[in-house]
Image: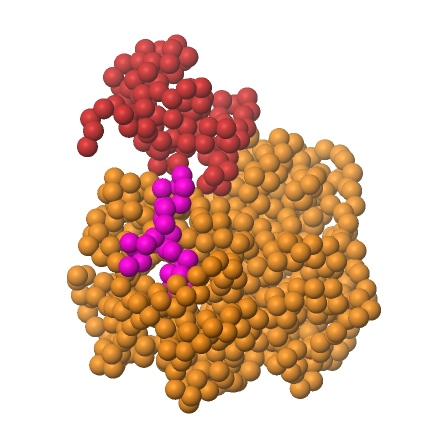
Amino acid sequence: MTFGELTTDEVRAQAGADGLSVQVGPFVVRLRTEIRELLDAWRFLYADFPLADGDFADFHIQIVPPEGLRRFVAPQAIFLSDGRRPFSPMPRSAALPLLEWGLNWCVASQAHQYLVVHSATVERGGRAILLPAPPNSGKSTLCAGLVHSGWRLLSDEFALVQPHDGDLVPMPRPISLKNAAIEVVSTLFPQAQLGPPARETLKGTVVHVRPPAASVARAQEAASPAWVIFPAYRAGARTEIKPFSKARALVALVDNAFNYGVLDRLGFETLARLVDGAACFELTYGDLTEALRLIGTLDAGGSGRAVGRPRREPPAAASVRTSRSGAGPSRVATNLVLAALRQPEMTRTLGLADWDLLVRQARRAFVLARLATRLADLDLLGPVPAQARLHLEAACGMALQDQQVARWEVDRIRRALAPTGVPLTLLKGAAYLMAELPIARGRRFSDIDILVPKTALTQVEAALRQHGWHVAKLDPYDQRYYRRWMHELPPLQHRQRWTIVDVHHTILPESGRLHPDPRRLLETARSLDGSGVRVLAPAHLILHSAAHLFQDGDMQGDLGNLLDLDGLLRHHGARDGFWRELATEAERLQLGRPLFYAFRYTAKLLDTPIPAEAVAGAGGGRPAWPLLAVMDRLVPLALVPEHPDHPERAVDVSRSLLYARSHWLRMPPLLLARHLLRKSFPRSSAPASTD
Amino acid sequence: MTTARPIWKLLEPNTLIWKRWDEGEYVIFNPASGDTHLLNSVSADVLTCLGQAPADAEALARRVASGLGIEADDAFMLAIEGLLAELDELGLVEAIRT
């Protein structure tokens, strides 16, 4: 059954309830929205697309109005996917482009079973053209022209390259035209079926061309790349096509690929093979008709080959299906991630619908790769339904890329600091990675944290600046705030690699209530053989992690941090004398309270085995019972991922309270009042010089 | 600070993946950084020479110039030193100070 065969009422009913599932190329997209004009437009553009079964979707998308008055005054639309909100709200009249751009974002950030290149792709006779280009290069105009001149639409947006054979997997979707291109295409090709215009988008007026039914019907047929043409539209320019060197074509494809780094060496090999087998050109055009004629002269024959989609498996017999509709699932049902992390064996019993929820929740809590790694270690990935396994494997790929980047950054920082003689001491994720601790596996990285003596800060910052790091955009107040009150320099970003290093001189803000002595941490740090770097002693790694989670943050989305603590305690806990050493160090560093919480919530939520005498030993950090009762209620709510489609009010309240708590712990009341006042009017004061 | 002329070596001698076509340009993939680099033939010669044995800039310039059939004059020397600094920044080579 196709989308177009549903009545308007059926479309609205499905999209307003569990969601409307459509097969778009190799992906199942589930859309939930109550915005009627969006549904009408989507139905027109996707009329020929098959509906998909409802158990598993690769991308869950919601387009919702904002809460409160904005629902009525200058109404807006918000894009959500698994609770994530990657874009700012847009005017409701731009809901369709927002949905299409959001779907692009889903593919580019998750579909790592393919090498995803920003490129239009079309095919004739089994031989495909890639048209890779940055935005505003005339790629879509050319694509629309080719599609209405006898070429089959594979995609207006992506080349999905299969690494194992280099073929292109089609994902035909509406072609997005902007501004002047709309008239060019509609004049030259009056048969093009255009959707409604959206006039208030960031890119001006946008109109979508409905993909030809014949292209949609052949969405399962892959094609071999035969030509790579880099287009550049220039108004009034002479239209010409020139050969392009394969080496340059390869590098330009790398520049246009979204997930080249995730695929690592396989990405390089895939593109090298693609370029090997294709003729490469650059096309400058000022005239669409002439450009189409020139491309037509390149054409030759060939035949398409079928591409297989992973077979849909029926749900396991023992499936514990969770509901997606009605009054909303219970909190227990939404703890699927926690259950899978605690008892990975239980995943054998999950059906496709359970996997659908588990993948989304784990992704939202930033622990999908950790879950995947844990399952792989226990040989439990095999039984996972193919559709879900692709997402788990993609997450592992992203984590491996993060780790490669982190290792390289550590090496670059080491190199930059070498002339200063200041020892490089790593904290948190980078320390776990370089010390090869088991918890580093599947862990994601956003930045590198290092610890240096406060007296060496100026020297270290100068050395890093000399090698390309700089203070990323921060206003003078923030800069001053960091340097006066925080435990670290403002984040330093590398100009070429965009990576961030946080240079700490202690582990908690100087303005806060606890002041662990960083000299103790540095004195006892351990050198790692052959790497030229050091990491904190095991007890200090744990205490820092606990302090970071329970003393310095609001715990939002911090299930990963709790997993760090769980992993560290399990890894080091078997060593003789470890628990006593941990208690002694906690007392020495004033970190008894965070350690108490670490014991309490790892044991409660992750079944971390902690000896009774260790728990008793941490009793000094136990808060008074009213506070503990509150924390017992708030912490699990903040750390355990909720159902992506059914956010709970209690979770919001809990996170707000923990957010307020984190500020209270960080600053004395007067400073907090001044800080909040300044943050309420972020642009009200004149720029001040940095200290 | 030492004033000795540094000896240069490839940072990851055996792991670089090379791709070459007939157009005199090379692409290399560095698995350590995940970076891909487009090289002209002089840069490729420099990396190839350093892959065979570490060398200082002067010896390297002489070897590369001889391969190209040109003279290793001061300008060429300076160009090689600049190139080494660039390759160092990219994490392809590193100096062993003596």
Visible residue check, residue B53? yes
Report which quarter residue B86 is drawn in.
top left
Q: Nearer the viewer, residue A51 or A472?
A: A472
For image coordinates 80% across by 70% down, the residue present is A318
The magenta segment: A520-544
Visible residue check, residue A557? no
**Does A589 appear in magenta?**
no
Please say if A449 is above or below A482. Answer: above
Task: State the quadrant of the C terminus of chain A.
Answer: bottom left
**Chain A pictured colour:** orange
Q: Residue A125, how many percent across, how many down?
A: 76, 39
Q: Residue A124, how many percent across, how many down?
A: 73, 41
Q: Nearer the viewer, residue A258 or A585?
A: A585
- Residue A333 is left or right of residue A67, and the answer is right
For image coordinates 34% across by 43% down, the residue present is A414
Q: Residue A478, how many percent across, how many down?
A: 26, 66
For image coordinates 41% across by 22% down, the residue present is B50
Task: In the picture, one chain is red; tell me its letter.
Answer: B
Task: State the quadrant of the N terminus of chain A.
Answer: bottom right
Q: Nearer the viewer, residue A491 or A142?
A: A491
